[in-house]
Amino acid sequence: MNRRTFLSAAVLTALASGIAPAAAAPRRTAGAAPDSRAVALLSRMTAAQKEALVRCDFAALSSLGIPALTMVDASAGLRGETGVTAFPVPLAQAATFDVDLAGRLGRALGAEARAKGYNNLLGPTVDTARTWHFGRQAESMGEDPLLSGTLGAALTRRIQEQHVVATVKHFSAYTQEVNRFFVDAQISDRALHEIYHAAFERIIDAVPVTSVMMAYPKINGTFATQSPALFNDLKKTIGLEGYTVPDFWAGDDPVGAVKAGMDLGGLGPGGVKIPVGGLTDGSVPTTRLDDAALRILNTMYVNGLFDHPVPAPAANVSTQAHKDLAHDLAVNSTVLLTNRSQALPLPSTIKSLAVIGPAENTALTGVSGSTYVNPGTWTTPLAAIKDRAGTGIAVTHRQGTLGDIPLTAVPATVLRTASGAAGLTGSFYAAAQPSGTPVAIQVSAGIDFTSAPVAGLPAVWSARWSGTLTPTTAGLHRFSLLPAGTTKLVINGKTVISGTRHSRRFFLGPYDYPLQGTIDLTAGKAVSISVEYSNSTADTGTCGLTLGWQPKSLIPDAVAAARTSDGAVVIVNRVAGEDMDHGSLNLPGDQDKLISDVAAANSRTIVVLNTDGPVAMPWINDVEAVVQLWYAGRATGTALAAVLFGDADPSGRLPVTFPVTASQGPGTTEATYPGNGPTVSHSEGHLVGYRYYDAKNQSPLFPFGHGLSYTTFNLGSLETSYNTAAKTLTAAVTLTNSGSREGTEVVQLYAGLPAGAQAEPRRLIGFRKVTLAAGASTRIAFSVTARDLSVWTAGAWKLTPGSCTVHVGRSSRSLSAQRLVTIN
């Protein structure tokens, strides 16, 4: 891509002479000069007014008629609002592999934002899912930049057509929540451009006058918000003509950030830490301040913020069309992972169905934090299944598991100290680890606090509680720890729970972030118990811990219901969100055992994963079908019912690779996740996601792009050619629905680059989602640019000559045809 200089000599000339306002903002193309009205307005502004614009002090600019930027998080709907539509999370959006649906979603988001009085929508989110640990992976659009960039471009374009500025986030390489405010990601220049920058490049190439949010982490030693190298990549190499803005209070030098290339100083006045006069005292060159102000004004003019003021906020902006769109997105994102013996769709022979698990209002509809949207009035999975089943199928519900929630605090009545007193003995230490001489010792009735439980503790402290616990029931016991910090539960010498949470829940909510574990205990038989805690890893100035339990398992009742039913649908979940990462690939609590026990009782067991991403599936060979539901917003229930009963084809495909175990994929050592101290090594380079699995010959549980249909498809022979003059690869293949019902397929095109490129074995270079009637065929054509066949080397994109292998198939591992093409 050509380097572009936004503040060109022509613009500087216009600034000096002054240009009359234009009648209307023209449609923008990459490399176009800024809107003449923006240039003219900037020429009339004082240095103090330019600083006020950067500082989001719109009240000080009222005499100039500059509209205030009114912002709202909106990657899956308008966060914090009521009367809006809760759409599926971004990872589910990516699972649709559907550009048209992404565009329709962008239009709906933009329309609802304007109707609620917002003109700046903080989204889409196109972070790259590097590891399964990432607590915000549901807010990403998967592991492949072509997929996320293509869908992100459709979203951004349609959002901004509604006279709302999109803010694409987060640039760049934001891949973990552990130490997110200061972690230093060590990444090669090649990986940055080929993986982490690439989605942004595709979006900006399509919509150059947009805005981009800079991420929290450091990249190669410098905060992203203060990195001249990253701003150079974004504005000159990639060609952003709009403005940049930091994530909330990101970095440690807001004035230095503006000097490096930051334009808007924060996410509204409350997010700005630049002091008055901080940009006009000589710390920042006047040309840089002019550039920042012009980028903001130009983005406003080009996207119609001056010409189309936002209306007064309406109470309810969710239309029936938007609700229908949410359902379509949810159905199109639902992935059928396995389907043995054609267990799905549910056959007419089923007359009784046991629905097990968190299937009522405890089902998860969104990811916690800045992307969560209140679903309002919605149909739960259980209600939707009952509605669809009608009177012909007897549907029973058994809880089976409470899912991923904190449990009721363990009472003092079952706890005893060494001296026989009710409760546990707590020893408190003035250090990050509970060792040495305690500064305080006291007996606690239980463990349940959100402030320091004893007076006089320092800012960083730790504790250990010990004693015995006498169970009142026999069998499987669930325990939970809800910490702000690091904690461990040991029972009879066995570590039941161990892990870290920076906060008990992110302040935007709505879900808690517990740690879970199980152990078999005998009624009346006392066991030793020890709980350790340190607030050294909690968010600054916070602490907290609750020891909870569930002494009576809900699994036996669920198994009994499954045994007497024709089929069983087991819904399991896992909470995820901002300010937390996953320490384990396993489903939390007792959910794996629930699935195994139900499957042993009912041969037609169907598992529904209401999760943010991949989980371990030790029971995979014992169940008939597995459905990946993600967090589907208000349509969580209706989409699931439509897929289970066959009213819709499950047409989602995996936007991330599902590992067999936690030892697969990138980030499997401490150095590569979460890092040694403040530094995390991205030693895998550009081999992220399926690229890593292919390069390392690892066999995933389910590959990128995988997903089954209720019909069957055949792909014909692949035809390819390369136009040397146009530097364009073309490919064509015939897709046939060889089954007996209408269905949807995602045809995926991959390329193995010439050996000289030293690239991954294959990369996605195209995809197409197609719905066909039974017996129908269609010819699918792809046109691939040189950029998608290039690698980043020595500071530029390079097209390597040689033999390129083009593959077509249904996933990164299911490739039915290939052709060799010579690139000259």
Image (cartoon, grey):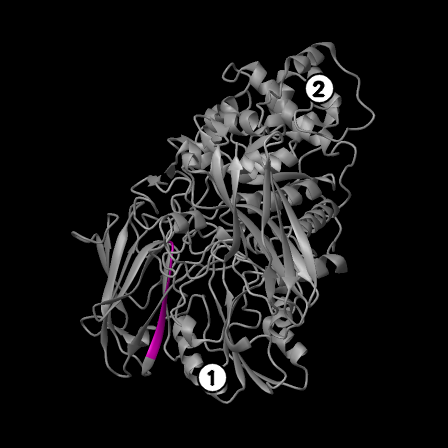
Q: Is residue 603 above or below residue 306?
A: below
Three-letter code, disc 1: Asn
Q: Position of residue 60 (x, y in %)?
A: 67, 26
Label 2: how many Cα within 10 Å (few below 14, some 14–19, many 20+) = many
Q: What residue is at 53 percent from the left and 43 percent from the top? A: 145
Q: Position of residue 539 (x, y in %)?
A: 40, 47
Locate residue 165: give its quadrant. Answer: top right
Estimate the spatial distance between the alpha carbons at disc 2 and disc 1, rounded to whole Å. Answer: 70 Å
Answer whether residue 356 is visible to the viewer in this image: no
Locate residue 498: give its quadrant. Answer: bottom left
Locate residue 647: give its quadrant. Answer: bottom right
Q: What residue is at 70 percent from the left and 63 percent from the top? A: 776
Q: Nearer the viewer, residue 548 or 134?
A: 134
Magenta-colored stretch includes residue 763 = no
Q: Secondary structure at mark 1?
A: loop
Three-letter code, disc 2: Val
Q: Is residue 18 above or below residue 180?
A: above
Give the label on residue 602, or none. Answer: 1
Side of 491 where 552 appears, left or right = right
Label 1: how many Cα within 10 Å (few below 14, some 14–19, many 20+) = many
Overall secondary structure of the magenta section:
strand
Q: What residue is at 54 percent from the left and 30 percent from the top? A: 234
Residue carrying label 2? 39
Name which of mark 2 and mark 1 comes first in the sequence: 2
Answer whether residue 261 is visible to the viewer in this image: yes
- The span picked out in magenta is 476-484
Q: Position of residue 25 (x, y in %)?
A: 77, 28
Q: Split into 4 quadrants, where in the image is the N terminus? A: top right
Q: Secondary structure at mark 2?
A: helix
**Given the current orientation, which residue lies at the most extreme bottom position?**
564
**Which of pointers 2 and 1 indicates the residue nearer the eye?**
1
